[in-house]
Image (tube, helix red, strand yellow):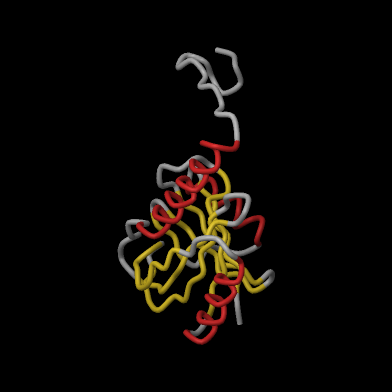
Amino acid sequence: MKRMHVHVAVKDIPQSVGFYSALFGAEPTVVKSDYAKWMLDDPRVNFAISSRRREPGLDHLGIQVESAEELGEVYGRLRKAGGEVIEQGQTVCCYAKSEKSWIDDPAGIAWETFHTTGESIVYGDGTGERTARVAHEKQEDKQSACCAPQPKAAPPEASACGSS
């Protein structure tokens, strides 16, 4: 049986653990200083948060499977979906050992497909995810170089909202 995976980048783990525990009516199944995860059955989701130098918000989505056979099935779907599939293989990520692949959807959201095979005492280095994001950025650069105007850079002193 497959499980939806949602990973959100947050600024404050303890505050976010409190919020999501109340929202889900459940405590996380894994809590670390930089990471927490809820394995919920209603809805069936692997919901994770981390504070690892990313902008707060949606980090990536995924599909978690329970067997190598299911993983093969989902990998077949990835190939049909189009786009570049980054096959990471065996890796350590989010305090777990997994076999996984990555793909970006047409909107640029990173999706991982994975089968967790064990626990880890380290978070992992995120190599496959970075590779998928870099591959997507290179594809965007190729498209924007010939097909779309380049955005003008804001002066360094300007804020995102245009005010000081």
Tell how many labels. Answer: 0
Q: Residue furthest bottom?
A: 69
Q: Quadrant of the N terminus?
A: bottom right
Image quarter of residue 162: top right
Q: Answer with the quarter of the image where residue 144 lies.
A: top right
The answer to whether 53 is drawn above or below residue 76 in the figure is above
Q: Quadrant of the C terminus?
A: top right
Q: Where residue 58 sits: x, y (%)?
A: 57, 49
Q: Nearer the viewer, residue 133 or 122?
A: 133
Provide residue 45's location: percent of width, then percent of height: 61, 68
Identify whether 152 is placed above or below 88.
above
Q: Is residue 124 left or right of residue 8?
A: left
Residue drawn 55% across and 60% down? 83
Which x, y percent locates residue 16? Answer: 54, 48
Q: Nearer the viewer, residue 56 or 127?
A: 127
Q: Outermost residue toward the front?
A: 146
Nearer to me, 115 or 46: 115
Front residue of 122/22: it is 122
Q: Position of residue 80 (x, y in %)?
A: 60, 71
Residue drawn at (56%, 26%), measured in percent from left and top? 151
**Residue at 46% in and 51% down:** 133
